[in-house]
Image (cartoon, rainbow, N blue to C red):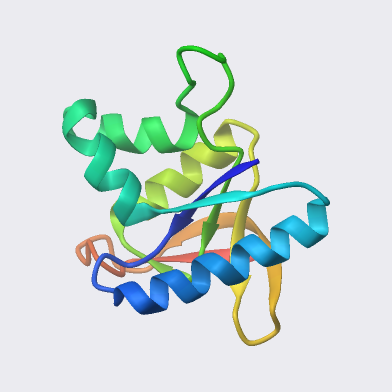
Amino acid sequence: MKVFLACAKGMPENEVEVKRKDVQRYLSMKNKKTVQVVPSKQDFETYFAQCGGWNEWITHVASGVDYTTRRHIYDAVVCVDARLGRATASIIEKTMEAGKPALLWDTQKNEMKRVTSVKTVDDTDWTGGWTLNTL
């Protein structure tokens, strides 16, 4: 299982790594299989230029398919904050449209919540104008 970990661009690397390990540990125990968790910054730095722009990169994350295996690149997307920027909001929406799980990692309770929708709070705030609704 391969999971995209959506973190704010400005989140310190050490904090991203703690969240990555926590999510990996939780999902590995829950699913009883190996889970690879890829932070958003890592995927962005590796694939954004190849994708050619924001819309193409968002599609790559949300519904992209590996050329060799013909499987989705990511099986799920996990957000670490309910407040999102435009790109992450689009990734979540497209992930759900593709029928894949979009989840919110609740650090306080050490659990995952299923995302049910994305709500626009302020569409002029590209770094935090969207929020997640969860079960």
Image quarter for residue 105?
Answer: bottom right
Image quarter for residue 71?
Answer: top right
Residue at image coords 34%, 45%: 43
Residue at image coords 39%, 64%: 7
Residue 5 placement, left or right of 10: right
The x, y position of residue 129, in whole percent, is 31, 67
Residue 106 placement, left or right of 18: right
Name the one closer to the observer, 77 or 47. Answer: 47
- The quadrant of the image that shows the N terminus is top right
The x, y position of residue 14, in whole percent, is 36, 77
Residue at image coords 43%, 58%: 6
Name the one closer to the observer, 25 or 127. Answer: 25
The x, y position of residue 79, in whole percent, is 50, 62
Name the one closer to the observer, 101 or 50. Answer: 50
Residue 26 placement, left or right of 133: right
Does residue 103 lie above or below 33 as drawn?
A: below
Residue 7 visible within the image: yes
Residue at image coords 49%, 29%: 63
Residue 81 visible within the image: no
- The quadrant of the image that shows the C terminus is bottom right
Residue 31 placement, left or right of 63: right
The x, y position of residue 36, in whole percent, is 57, 48
